[in-house]
Amino acid sequence: MSHFNRVVRVPGDPILGLMEAYRGDPNPAKLDLGVGVYKDAQGLTPIPRAVKLAEQRLVDGQTSKSYIGGHGDALFCARLAQLVLGADNPLLDARAAASQTPGGTGALRLAADFIGHCLPGRGIWLSDPTWPIHESIFAAAGLPVSHYPYVGADNRLDIEGMLAALAEIPRGDVVLLHACCHNPTGFDLGPRDWKRVLEVVKARELLPLIDFAYQGFGDGLEQDAWAVRLFAAELPELLITSSCSKNFGLYRERTGALLVCAATPEKLLDVRSQLAFLARNLWSTPPAHGAAVVASILDDAELKSLWSSELDGMRQRVASLRAGLVEALQPYGLAERFAHIGVQRGMFSYTGLSPQQVQRLRDEFSVYMVGSGRANVAGLDAERLDELAAAIAAVCR
Ligand SMILES: Cc1ncc(COP(=O)(O)O)c(C=O)c1O
Protein backbone atom coordinates (compact mmCIF):
# COMPACT_ATOMS: atom_id res chain seq x y z
CA MET A 1 0.00 0.00 0.00
CA SER A 2 1.23 3.50 -0.77
CA HIS A 3 0.31 6.09 1.83
CA PHE A 4 0.97 8.89 -0.60
CA ASN A 5 -0.87 7.46 -3.62
CA ARG A 6 -3.75 9.89 -3.34
CA VAL A 7 -1.55 12.94 -2.90
CA VAL A 8 -1.91 15.21 -5.90
CA ARG A 9 0.49 17.91 -6.96
CA VAL A 10 -0.65 21.50 -6.49
CA PRO A 11 0.62 24.21 -8.81
CA GLY A 12 3.53 26.24 -7.44
CA ASP A 13 3.28 29.92 -6.56
CA PRO A 14 2.89 31.67 -9.96
CA ILE A 15 5.28 34.45 -8.88
CA LEU A 16 8.00 31.91 -8.06
CA GLY A 17 7.39 30.32 -11.49
CA LEU A 18 7.86 33.74 -13.04
CA MET A 19 11.16 34.12 -11.16
CA GLU A 20 12.35 30.80 -12.55
CA ALA A 21 11.42 31.79 -16.10
CA TYR A 22 13.29 35.06 -15.60
CA ARG A 23 16.40 33.27 -14.36
CA GLY A 24 16.34 30.98 -17.40
CA ASP A 25 16.02 33.86 -19.89
CA PRO A 26 19.42 34.40 -21.61
CA ASN A 27 18.53 37.95 -22.77
CA PRO A 28 21.01 40.28 -20.98
CA ALA A 29 18.46 43.12 -21.21
CA LYS A 30 15.81 41.20 -19.24
CA LEU A 31 13.85 43.06 -16.57
CA ASP A 32 12.27 41.48 -13.46
CA LEU A 33 9.19 43.38 -12.32
CA GLY A 34 7.62 40.28 -10.77
CA VAL A 35 8.76 39.32 -7.33
CA GLY A 36 7.64 41.55 -4.43
CA VAL A 37 10.91 42.66 -2.87
CA TYR A 38 12.54 46.07 -2.87
CA LYS A 39 15.55 46.45 -5.17
CA ASP A 40 18.13 49.20 -5.23
CA ALA A 41 19.70 50.86 -8.29
CA GLN A 42 22.04 47.85 -8.64
CA GLY A 43 19.10 45.45 -8.68
CA LEU A 44 19.97 44.12 -5.21
CA THR A 45 17.75 43.75 -2.16
CA PRO A 46 20.03 45.47 0.34
CA ILE A 47 20.52 44.99 4.07
CA PRO A 48 20.10 48.48 5.58
CA ARG A 49 23.25 49.75 7.31
CA ALA A 50 21.28 50.25 10.53
CA VAL A 51 20.42 46.52 10.44
CA LYS A 52 24.06 45.55 9.89
CA LEU A 53 25.17 47.72 12.82
CA ALA A 54 22.47 46.33 15.10
CA GLU A 55 23.37 42.77 14.09
CA GLN A 56 27.00 43.38 14.92
CA ARG A 57 26.07 44.58 18.39
CA LEU A 58 23.82 41.57 18.87
CA VAL A 59 26.47 39.07 17.88
CA ASP A 60 28.90 40.65 20.32
CA GLY A 61 26.44 40.98 23.19
CA GLN A 62 24.33 37.83 22.93
CA THR A 63 24.78 35.42 25.82
CA SER A 64 22.02 32.84 25.27
CA LYS A 65 19.96 31.16 22.61
CA SER A 66 17.29 30.04 25.04
CA TYR A 67 13.61 30.43 24.02
CA ILE A 68 11.98 33.82 24.06
CA GLY A 69 8.44 33.94 25.51
CA GLY A 70 5.16 33.22 23.72
CA HIS A 71 4.58 36.89 22.87
CA GLY A 72 8.22 37.20 21.79
CA ASP A 73 10.75 39.89 22.60
CA ALA A 74 9.14 42.35 25.04
CA LEU A 75 11.25 45.33 23.93
CA PHE A 76 10.48 44.60 20.27
CA CYS A 77 6.75 44.41 21.05
CA ALA A 78 6.80 47.68 22.99
CA ARG A 79 8.81 49.61 20.39
CA LEU A 80 6.92 48.21 17.40
CA ALA A 81 3.57 49.06 19.01
CA GLN A 82 4.85 52.63 19.40
CA LEU A 83 5.98 52.72 15.78
CA VAL A 84 2.54 51.59 14.61
CA LEU A 85 0.24 53.42 17.01
CA GLY A 86 2.41 56.48 17.76
CA ALA A 87 4.92 56.88 20.57
CA ASP A 88 2.54 58.69 22.94
CA ASN A 89 -0.64 56.80 22.15
CA PRO A 90 -2.60 56.47 25.43
CA LEU A 91 -3.90 53.06 24.30
CA LEU A 92 -0.42 51.68 24.88
CA ASP A 93 -0.84 52.09 28.64
CA ALA A 94 -3.11 49.08 28.90
CA ARG A 95 -5.56 48.70 26.04
CA ALA A 96 -3.20 47.81 23.17
CA ALA A 97 -0.21 45.50 22.81
CA ALA A 98 1.78 43.58 20.22
CA SER A 99 2.62 39.89 20.05
CA GLN A 100 5.68 38.99 17.99
CA THR A 101 5.07 36.66 15.04
CA PRO A 102 7.13 35.12 12.23
CA GLY A 103 6.63 37.96 9.73
CA GLY A 104 3.40 39.60 8.67
CA THR A 105 2.30 36.23 7.32
CA GLY A 106 2.56 34.72 10.80
CA ALA A 107 0.58 37.65 12.22
CA LEU A 108 -2.15 37.08 9.66
CA ARG A 109 -2.28 33.37 10.41
CA LEU A 110 -2.44 34.02 14.15
CA ALA A 111 -5.24 36.55 13.59
CA ALA A 112 -7.05 33.99 11.42
CA ASP A 113 -6.78 31.30 14.11
CA PHE A 114 -7.90 33.78 16.77
CA ILE A 115 -10.99 34.69 14.76
CA GLY A 116 -11.72 31.03 14.02
CA HIS A 117 -11.34 29.88 17.62
CA CYS A 118 -12.59 32.85 19.61
CA LEU A 119 -15.14 34.52 17.30
CA PRO A 120 -16.80 31.47 15.73
CA GLY A 121 -19.12 32.03 12.81
CA ARG A 122 -17.47 35.27 11.68
CA GLY A 123 -16.55 35.55 8.04
CA ILE A 124 -13.68 37.60 6.65
CA TRP A 125 -13.98 40.09 3.79
CA LEU A 126 -11.02 40.79 1.52
CA SER A 127 -10.55 43.42 -1.16
CA ASP A 128 -10.91 42.24 -4.75
CA PRO A 129 -8.11 41.92 -5.67
CA THR A 130 -5.85 41.33 -2.71
CA TRP A 131 -2.50 39.68 -1.92
CA PRO A 132 -3.26 36.06 -2.96
CA ILE A 133 -1.85 34.65 0.29
CA HIS A 134 -4.67 36.42 2.21
CA GLU A 135 -7.10 34.12 0.43
CA SER A 136 -5.31 30.93 1.39
CA ILE A 137 -4.38 31.91 4.97
CA PHE A 138 -7.95 32.60 6.05
CA ALA A 139 -9.30 29.61 4.15
CA ALA A 140 -6.67 27.43 5.85
CA ALA A 141 -7.94 28.62 9.23
CA GLY A 142 -11.46 27.56 8.21
CA LEU A 143 -12.97 31.04 7.90
CA PRO A 144 -15.60 31.79 5.26
CA VAL A 145 -13.79 34.16 2.84
CA SER A 146 -15.73 36.77 0.83
CA HIS A 147 -14.77 39.87 -1.15
CA TYR A 148 -15.63 43.53 -1.53
CA PRO A 149 -14.86 45.43 -4.73
CA TYR A 150 -11.74 47.58 -4.67
CA VAL A 151 -10.58 48.30 -8.20
CA GLY A 152 -13.02 48.64 -11.08
CA ALA A 153 -12.75 47.40 -14.66
CA ASP A 154 -11.41 50.87 -15.53
CA ASN A 155 -8.36 50.19 -13.28
CA ARG A 156 -9.38 52.88 -10.78
CA LEU A 157 -10.15 52.69 -7.06
CA ASP A 158 -13.85 51.80 -6.75
CA ILE A 159 -14.60 53.51 -3.44
CA GLU A 160 -18.35 53.68 -4.02
CA GLY A 161 -18.51 49.97 -4.84
CA MET A 162 -16.40 49.20 -1.80
CA LEU A 163 -18.58 51.24 0.57
CA ALA A 164 -21.80 49.79 -0.84
CA ALA A 165 -20.49 46.25 -0.35
CA LEU A 166 -19.21 46.93 3.18
CA ALA A 167 -22.66 48.27 4.09
CA GLU A 168 -24.11 44.83 3.29
CA ILE A 169 -21.62 42.76 5.27
CA PRO A 170 -23.21 40.72 8.09
CA ARG A 171 -22.93 42.53 11.42
CA GLY A 172 -19.84 41.45 13.34
CA ASP A 173 -17.85 40.05 10.40
CA VAL A 174 -14.17 40.88 9.96
CA VAL A 175 -13.00 43.22 7.19
CA LEU A 176 -9.37 43.17 6.09
CA LEU A 177 -8.04 46.58 5.03
CA HIS A 178 -4.57 47.42 3.67
CA ALA A 179 -3.15 50.31 5.72
CA CYS A 180 -1.11 51.64 2.78
CA CYS A 181 0.67 50.49 -0.40
CA HIS A 182 -2.16 48.13 -1.37
CA ASN A 183 -0.83 44.85 -2.72
CA PRO A 184 -1.28 44.16 -5.63
CA THR A 185 -2.81 47.38 -6.98
CA GLY A 186 -0.89 50.30 -5.40
CA PHE A 187 -4.21 52.17 -5.08
CA ASP A 188 -4.64 53.53 -1.53
CA LEU A 189 -7.63 55.07 0.19
CA GLY A 190 -7.37 58.82 0.83
CA PRO A 191 -8.22 60.38 4.24
CA ARG A 192 -11.81 61.08 3.19
CA ASP A 193 -12.24 57.49 1.95
CA TRP A 194 -10.89 56.12 5.24
CA LYS A 195 -13.36 58.23 7.23
CA ARG A 196 -16.24 56.93 5.13
CA VAL A 197 -15.04 53.34 5.59
CA LEU A 198 -14.83 53.96 9.34
CA GLU A 199 -18.45 55.13 9.41
CA VAL A 200 -19.62 51.92 7.71
CA VAL A 201 -17.45 49.82 10.02
CA LYS A 202 -19.11 51.51 13.01
CA ALA A 203 -22.62 51.26 11.59
CA ARG A 204 -22.25 47.54 10.75
CA GLU A 205 -20.22 46.80 13.90
CA LEU A 206 -17.50 45.17 11.83
CA LEU A 207 -14.13 44.16 13.25
CA PRO A 208 -11.33 45.64 11.11
CA LEU A 209 -8.13 43.71 10.62
CA ILE A 210 -5.62 46.17 9.17
CA ASP A 211 -2.69 44.66 7.30
CA PHE A 212 0.28 47.01 7.69
CA ALA A 213 3.04 45.39 5.65
CA TYR A 214 4.62 48.51 4.13
CA GLN A 215 4.93 51.17 6.85
CA GLY A 216 7.24 53.85 5.49
CA PHE A 217 6.96 52.80 1.84
CA GLY A 218 3.96 55.01 0.99
CA ASP A 219 4.32 58.58 2.21
CA GLY A 220 6.43 58.16 5.37
CA LEU A 221 6.50 56.25 8.67
CA GLU A 222 4.04 58.56 10.41
CA GLN A 223 1.89 59.43 7.40
CA ASP A 224 1.37 55.75 6.51
CA ALA A 225 0.10 55.05 10.04
CA TRP A 226 -2.58 57.75 9.87
CA ALA A 227 -5.54 55.46 9.10
CA VAL A 228 -4.41 52.80 11.59
CA ARG A 229 -4.26 55.43 14.33
CA LEU A 230 -7.61 56.91 13.31
CA PHE A 231 -9.26 53.48 13.57
CA ALA A 232 -7.50 52.76 16.88
CA ALA A 233 -8.75 56.07 18.31
CA GLU A 234 -12.31 55.69 17.07
CA LEU A 235 -13.02 52.02 17.68
CA PRO A 236 -12.93 50.00 20.89
CA GLU A 237 -11.49 46.91 19.21
CA LEU A 238 -9.06 46.41 16.36
CA LEU A 239 -6.54 43.91 14.99
CA ILE A 240 -3.40 45.09 13.16
CA THR A 241 -0.78 42.91 11.49
CA SER A 242 2.63 44.51 11.07
CA SER A 243 5.57 43.29 9.01
CA CYS A 244 9.23 44.30 9.30
CA SER A 245 10.16 42.45 6.10
CA LYS A 246 10.14 45.37 3.68
CA ASN A 247 10.82 48.44 5.82
CA PHE A 248 13.74 46.84 7.72
CA GLY A 249 14.83 44.63 4.79
CA LEU A 250 14.51 41.64 7.13
CA TYR A 251 12.52 39.42 4.74
CA ARG A 252 14.11 36.09 5.60
CA GLU A 253 14.36 36.78 9.33
CA ARG A 254 10.56 36.46 9.63
CA THR A 255 9.82 39.45 11.81
CA GLY A 256 6.39 40.89 12.47
CA ALA A 257 3.65 41.28 15.04
CA LEU A 258 -0.06 41.06 15.68
CA LEU A 259 -1.32 44.12 17.54
CA VAL A 260 -4.57 44.01 19.45
CA CYS A 261 -6.57 46.98 20.70
CA ALA A 262 -9.22 45.92 23.21
CA ALA A 263 -12.01 47.80 24.97
CA THR A 264 -10.57 47.28 28.46
CA PRO A 265 -7.22 46.25 30.00
CA GLU A 266 -8.89 43.07 31.33
CA LYS A 267 -10.12 42.11 27.86
CA LEU A 268 -6.69 42.75 26.38
CA LEU A 269 -5.26 40.19 28.82
CA ASP A 270 -7.96 37.68 27.86
CA VAL A 271 -7.25 38.11 24.14
CA ARG A 272 -3.48 37.91 24.64
CA SER A 273 -3.81 34.72 26.66
CA GLN A 274 -5.61 33.19 23.66
CA LEU A 275 -2.95 34.46 21.25
CA ALA A 276 -0.17 32.86 23.30
CA PHE A 277 -2.13 29.61 23.40
CA LEU A 278 -2.79 29.63 19.64
CA ALA A 279 0.81 30.61 18.81
CA ARG A 280 2.04 27.69 20.90
CA ASN A 281 0.30 25.36 18.45
CA LEU A 282 1.61 27.19 15.40
CA TRP A 283 5.29 27.98 16.06
CA SER A 284 5.64 27.65 19.82
CA THR A 285 7.78 30.75 20.27
CA PRO A 286 8.80 33.16 17.51
CA PRO A 287 12.30 33.42 16.01
CA ALA A 288 14.51 35.83 17.97
CA HIS A 289 17.03 37.39 15.62
CA GLY A 290 15.01 39.80 13.45
CA ALA A 291 12.98 41.07 16.40
CA ALA A 292 16.14 41.70 18.41
CA VAL A 293 17.53 43.70 15.47
CA VAL A 294 14.37 45.80 15.18
CA ALA A 295 14.25 46.32 18.95
CA SER A 296 17.82 47.56 19.08
CA ILE A 297 17.24 49.94 16.16
CA LEU A 298 14.01 51.39 17.50
CA ASP A 299 15.47 51.69 21.01
CA ASP A 300 18.54 53.65 19.93
CA ALA A 301 18.03 57.22 18.69
CA GLU A 302 21.06 57.14 16.38
CA LEU A 303 20.27 53.79 14.77
CA LYS A 304 16.63 54.74 14.45
CA SER A 305 17.47 57.92 12.64
CA LEU A 306 19.91 56.09 10.32
CA TRP A 307 17.26 53.46 9.56
CA SER A 308 14.55 56.00 8.96
CA SER A 309 16.75 57.92 6.50
CA GLU A 310 17.58 54.67 4.69
CA LEU A 311 13.86 53.92 4.50
CA ASP A 312 13.27 57.43 3.13
CA GLY A 313 15.81 56.59 0.42
CA MET A 314 13.93 53.42 -0.56
CA ARG A 315 10.62 55.25 -0.68
CA GLN A 316 12.04 58.13 -2.70
CA ARG A 317 13.64 55.77 -5.19
CA VAL A 318 10.29 54.09 -5.86
CA ALA A 319 8.51 57.47 -6.11
CA SER A 320 11.04 58.79 -8.62
CA LEU A 321 10.82 55.60 -10.71
CA ARG A 322 7.04 56.00 -10.82
CA ALA A 323 7.31 59.61 -11.95
CA GLY A 324 10.13 58.75 -14.38
CA LEU A 325 8.16 55.98 -16.09
CA VAL A 326 5.12 58.20 -16.61
CA GLU A 327 7.43 60.87 -18.08
CA ALA A 328 9.13 58.33 -20.34
CA LEU A 329 5.69 57.34 -21.69
CA GLN A 330 4.99 60.96 -22.66
CA PRO A 331 6.58 60.85 -26.16
CA TYR A 332 4.29 57.93 -27.01
CA GLY A 333 1.18 59.86 -25.99
CA LEU A 334 0.69 57.40 -23.12
CA ALA A 335 1.44 59.60 -20.08
CA GLU A 336 -2.22 60.25 -19.37
CA ARG A 337 -3.26 56.65 -19.84
CA PHE A 338 -0.62 55.54 -17.31
CA ALA A 339 -0.80 58.59 -14.99
CA HIS A 340 -2.12 56.30 -12.20
CA ILE A 341 1.38 54.79 -11.91
CA GLY A 342 2.51 58.12 -10.46
CA VAL A 343 -0.45 58.30 -8.07
CA GLN A 344 -0.23 54.75 -6.70
CA ARG A 345 1.86 54.10 -3.60
CA GLY A 346 4.31 51.41 -2.52
CA MET A 347 6.21 48.97 -4.64
CA PHE A 348 3.32 47.65 -6.69
CA SER A 349 1.41 49.01 -9.60
CA TYR A 350 -1.66 47.66 -11.26
CA THR A 351 -0.50 48.94 -14.62
CA GLY A 352 -3.74 48.23 -16.44
CA LEU A 353 -1.88 46.12 -19.01
CA SER A 354 -3.91 43.08 -20.14
CA PRO A 355 -2.68 39.48 -19.70
CA GLN A 356 -1.98 39.42 -23.45
CA GLN A 357 0.11 42.59 -23.26
CA VAL A 358 1.98 41.20 -20.24
CA GLN A 359 2.70 38.03 -22.22
CA ARG A 360 3.99 40.05 -25.21
CA LEU A 361 6.24 42.11 -22.94
CA ARG A 362 7.74 38.87 -21.70
CA ASP A 363 8.01 37.12 -25.09
CA GLU A 364 9.22 40.07 -27.14
CA PHE A 365 11.11 42.23 -24.62
CA SER A 366 12.04 39.91 -21.70
CA VAL A 367 10.07 42.14 -19.31
CA TYR A 368 8.60 39.95 -16.56
CA MET A 369 5.53 40.97 -14.57
CA VAL A 370 2.56 39.16 -13.03
CA GLY A 371 -0.23 38.20 -15.47
CA SER A 372 -2.69 40.53 -13.73
CA GLY A 373 -0.54 43.44 -14.96
CA ARG A 374 0.99 43.97 -11.51
CA ALA A 375 4.50 45.39 -11.77
CA ASN A 376 7.00 45.75 -8.96
CA VAL A 377 8.11 49.33 -9.59
CA ALA A 378 11.18 48.83 -7.39
CA GLY A 379 12.45 46.34 -9.99
CA LEU A 380 12.84 49.16 -12.54
CA ASP A 381 16.18 50.55 -13.59
CA ALA A 382 16.22 54.38 -13.73
CA GLU A 383 18.61 54.19 -16.70
CA ARG A 384 16.25 51.99 -18.69
CA LEU A 385 12.89 53.72 -18.31
CA ASP A 386 12.92 54.85 -21.96
CA GLU A 387 13.52 51.28 -23.07
CA LEU A 388 10.61 50.03 -20.97
CA ALA A 389 8.36 52.84 -22.17
CA ALA A 390 9.14 51.86 -25.78
CA ALA A 391 8.27 48.23 -25.01
CA ILE A 392 4.99 49.23 -23.33
CA ALA A 393 4.17 51.47 -26.29
CA ALA A 394 4.84 48.57 -28.69
CA VAL A 395 2.42 46.23 -26.91
CA CYS A 396 -0.23 48.96 -26.52
CA ARG A 397 -0.32 49.73 -30.22
C1 LIG B 1 -0.12 42.75 1.82
C2 LIG B 1 0.90 41.91 2.50
N1 LIG B 1 0.67 41.47 3.73
C3 LIG B 1 1.55 40.72 4.40
C4 LIG B 1 2.74 40.36 3.82
C5 LIG B 1 3.64 39.47 4.63
O1 LIG B 1 4.93 39.77 4.70
P1 LIG B 1 6.00 38.90 5.51
O2 LIG B 1 5.34 37.65 5.98
O3 LIG B 1 7.08 38.63 4.54
O4 LIG B 1 6.41 39.76 6.65
C6 LIG B 1 3.06 40.78 2.52
C7 LIG B 1 4.29 40.40 1.85
O5 LIG B 1 4.47 40.46 0.68
C8 LIG B 1 2.10 41.59 1.85
O6 LIG B 1 2.31 42.04 0.61
Image (cartoon, rainbow, N blue to C red):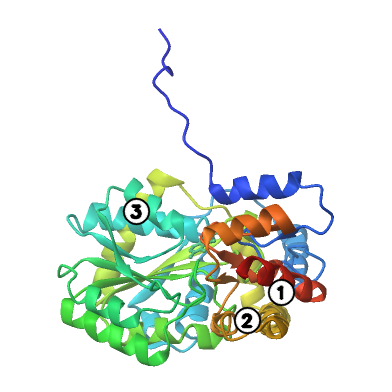
What is the number of the mark on residue 138?
3
Q: Is residue 228 above or below residue 393?
A: below
Q: Position of residue 334 (x, y in %)?
A: 63, 81
What residue is shown at x 54% (from left), y 82% (from top)?
340
Using a 10 Å C-alpha cutoff, classify the residue at mark 1 as few (fewer than 14 neighbours), some (14 to 19) or many (20 or more). Answer: many
What is the number of the mark on residue 349?
none
Q: Earlier in the sequence, mark 1 or mark 2?
A: 2
What is the number of the mark on residue 334?
2
Secondary structure under the numbered disc 1 in the rendered image:
helix
Give the residue at the far front of this rendering.
397
The three-letter amino acid code for the residue at tag 1 is Ala
Give yes or no for contact between labels 1 and 2 (Cβ–Cβ under 8 Å).
Answer: yes
Question: Which of the pair 150/373 is nearer the observer?
Answer: 373
Can the viewer see residue 361? yes
Give yes or no for contact between labels 3 and 1 (Cβ–Cβ under 8 Å).
Answer: no
Secondary structure under the numbered disc 2 in the rendered image:
loop
Give the residue at the far bottom of this rendering.
192
Q: Quadrant of residue 258?
A: bottom left
Kindly report the distance in space between the C-alpha atoms of the residues bearing marks 1 and 2.
9 Å
Q: Position of residue 28 (x, y in %)?
A: 84, 55
What is the number of the mark on residue 389?
1
Tell me the quarter of the image containing the C terminus.
bottom right
> Which dot, 3 or 1, sits closer to the camera?
1
Question: Which of the pair 106/5 is nearer the observer?
Answer: 5
Q: Quadrant of residue 254?
A: bottom right
The three-letter amino acid code for the residue at tag 2 is Leu
Question: Which of the pair 10/89 is nearer the observer?
Answer: 10
Q: Is residue 71 above or below residue 188?
A: above
The three-letter amino acid code for the residue at tag 3 is Phe
What residue is shown at x 24% (from left), y 74% (from top)?
166
